[in-house]
Image (cartoon, rainbow, N blue to C red):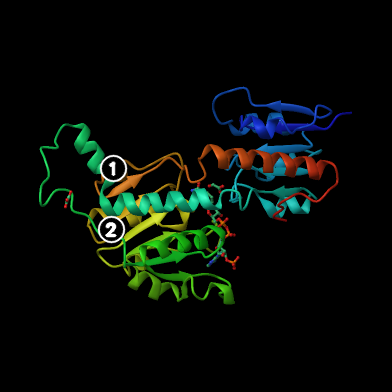
Amino acid sequence: MPYNIYVTRKIPQAGLDLLPPTFSVSVNPFDRNLRRSEIIEHTKDADALICLLTDVIDRSVIDSAPRLKCISNYAVGYNNIDVEYATSKGIVVCNTPGVLTESTADLAWALIMSCARRIVESDVYTRASLFKGWEPMLMLGQDVYNKTLGIIGMGRIGRAVARRAKGFNMKVLGYNRSPQKAEDKDLWEQVDLHTLLQESDFVSLHLPLTDETHHLLGEKELKMMKRSAILINTARGAVVDEPALIRLLKQERIAGAGFDVYEQEPFIPKELMELKNVVLLPHIGSASIETRTEMAVMAAKNAIAVIKGQEPLARVN
Ligand code: NAP
Ligand code: GLV
Ligand code: GLV
């Protein structure tokens, strides 16, 4: 009997092309993400699943997939998967670390610059034919160079964001679970979370979403930030208490925020949509052609390796 691979959404062809013709490969034919019942239906006979960060792979999905050997997430974050339960069933869970590091760091920087220099607002203004010539007080924002950048979560992406800050002559403060490595001493200064929040002009989040990091920034922590500070979240929405953040942004208790991720994606509260001091993106951290291609290749290679009984490129359990 051939091995079955189910792919929950069309990913770049370079990944799909790697799946050997000896495998029986099915790809969701629709131009939309699958509903839970559809994921269960299609995973029933699968040996490997290539899935998205929006697909919730919990106990009920795993229990209805007796043949499943591999859950290959097309993402580095894997908070959508019940990894502990998968592990108890002998299922290997894989992700796509590394290949998306630089693109996601670039996007965090795009948000820093957009928020600081009011890029999106200025574009809307210009398209509305409101530009009447250079003005001394038009669209004044904040400088980025020479400022302090606080990075929460100093892993692959956090460090890539720190490297870019060197070009802006910024002081970089970092907060991380594990101690700083010696080679990072010149890249960032290790501080506690409260110091980071109090001293940073820009705070950028680069943690995974876990039980420990859920609402790591609540109202109390957000209020420790400077009134002039800007928060950037390209990690996961639920690392921040979103309603508290919206309240503080409304009160201008925090100057601005750049969002790539939200607490209840794809839902975005109306009050957040109406705020002027935010930039809202549709979870596009890794969305470059090159990176998504590399992610597809990695996700496919992970699934193939597990099915063949080999070590995948990246496993999380
Ligand atoms: P990573 O290399 O694993 O880095 C995560 C860092 O967070 C690690 O240094 C880790 O510390 C630290 N950390 C974990 N739990 C912590 C805690 N409780 N307190 C303090 N620090 C903690 O992961 P990555 O590749 O940089 O990716 C980070 C996250 O970005 C992903 O999990 C994903 O959710 C998100 N992401 C989003 C996009 C997007 O499209 N917006 C794209 C890619 C990734 P240790 O050194 O102790 O492990
Ligand atoms: C994107 O959010 C990822 O985790 O890869
Ligand atoms: C602005 O365009 C300047 O020349 O200062």
| Category of crowding for the residue at label 2, using alpha-carbon neighbours closer than 10 angstroms: few (below 14), some (14–19), many (at least 20) | some
Vertical side of 189 occupied by 54: above or below: above
Q: Residue at 45% across / 51% down in the picture? A: 106
| Category of crowding for the residue at label 1, using alpha-carbon neighbours closer than 10 angstroms: few (below 14), some (14–19), many (at least 20) | some
Is 15 displayed left or right of 68 in the figure? left
Indicate which disc, 2 or 1, sits on the residue closer to the N terminus.
1
Which residue is under mark 2? Answer: 248
Q: Quadrant of the C terminus?
A: bottom right
Give 104 or 274, whichever is nearer the viewer.
Answer: 104
Which residue is under mark 1? Answer: 120
Q: For the view shown, which residue lies furthest in the top direction?
A: 29
Q: Quadrant of the N terminus?
A: top right
- The amino acid type, in three-letter code, at marker 1 is Val
Does dot 2 land on a helix, a strand or a loop? helix
Is 83 displayed left or right of 284 in the figure? right
Is 33 displayed left or right of 231 in the figure? right
Residue 67 in the image: state x and y as whole percent: 81, 38
Which quadrant of the figure has residue 134? top left
- The amino acid type, in three-letter code, at marker 2 is Leu
Q: Is residue 206 visible?
A: no
Q: Nearer the viewer, mark 2 or mark 1?
A: 1
